[in-house]
Image (cartoon, helix red, strand yellow):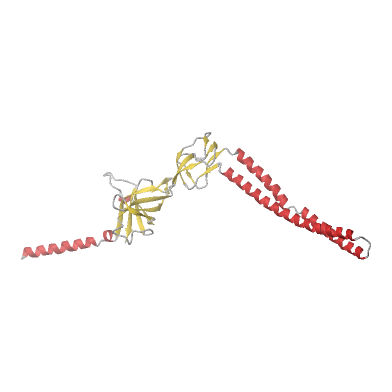
Amino acid sequence: MKYLFLLSSFVIVLTTTTQAQQNTPSQANEVRAENCMVKIINNVNVPAEVEGKLMELRFEEGATVAKGDILAIIDDTQAKLGVELKMAEEKEALLNATNEVNLTDAINNEKLASAEAEAYKELRREGAIPFWELEKKRLEATRAKLRIDLAEQQMQIAKVQFKAKETERQMAEYELQKRKVTAPFDGFIETRIAQPGGWVQAGTPIATLVQLDRLRIEGDIDIRRYPEIVRRGTPVTVLIFPEINRTNELNRERAIKVEGKIDFVSSEIDLNSGYRVWVEIPNKQLNGEWQIKRGMRGEIVVRQ
């Protein structure tokens, strides 16, 4: 009886311990994607947009640049001259569009012709002039009115021509701007490809630019077991492990913790019988070095 009592007590304690382990928050309330990898979101070879001689490079490998910074300049002598020519043509068109001399002259002539026609009507009633003299003045007054319409129409045409010249000037400025190779986003110059003085074609890569202020951590989760919680927009905690212990294990004590949300869930099962998910995470610099680097391992923790 004594041994039976001890055995029963051991079974009760073991059952209670097992239930307690199953109900611990780390196991019951978490879905964890392990062996995740930090990857780059934007990694592009910045190209030249036009053909020409590469006159200047304004960056070095390893430099950090901002969006819109000029990386290189292609020979722009002809493009600058084109802009100056189009600016002169635009100014000429503006002067024509705002010139009201012809319109004012036409209005004054119409007033004079109409007054003469009225005066000739009185002379005709008195019999001082023949009918054809009156008819001539009347037609001259009508022609003066038509000249007003013509002057107004010419001003409208001049305004349209000015708009066309303005557009041509903008196109010339755009062609000039394309001689400046600029950074499409904030990033890190990974590689310099082109050389100063070399000839480049449209599409020739100048440098490799990598975005480091925002990265992506990617891994696999078996969402078939958790279809209600593993979805786009679900809040998650991301752990990044920048160091490895001497035993080649992740140093969890130095893990970088980032709060985020699931930004992508794949529609197909991969080779690991899981669904690929990734989370976009911010990155910061510490003492001139980025804290999170491409290739670091991490985990994505989804709390139920």
Image location (x, y in percent) of residue 99:
74, 52
Q: Is residue 177 above or below residue 159?
A: above
| Nearer to the camera, 18 or 263 | 263
Q: Residue at x 65, y 44 (%)?
A: 86
Q: Image height check: is 197 above or below 246?
A: above
Picture residue at 78% right of the left edge, 57% below the top? 146
Q: Which residue in the rendered view is the most extreme toward the top? A: 197
Q: Residue furthest left?
A: 1
Left/right placement of residue 296 relative to residue 178 reads left
Q: How many badges with numbers are in the image?
A: 0
Given residues 27 and 247, the one toward you in this image is 27
Q: Position of residue 54 (x, y in %)?
A: 54, 36
Position of the N terminus by quadrant:
bottom left
* Quarter of the C terminus within the rendering: bottom left
Displayed quadrant of residue 118 = bottom right
Give percent across and percent down for residue 154: 73, 53
Would residue 186 be found to the left or right of residue 278 on screen? right
Question: Percent x, y for residue 53?
Answer: 55, 35
Q: Nearer the viewer, residue 299 or 84?
A: 84
Identify the residue at horizontal 66%, vertical 45% (top origin). 87
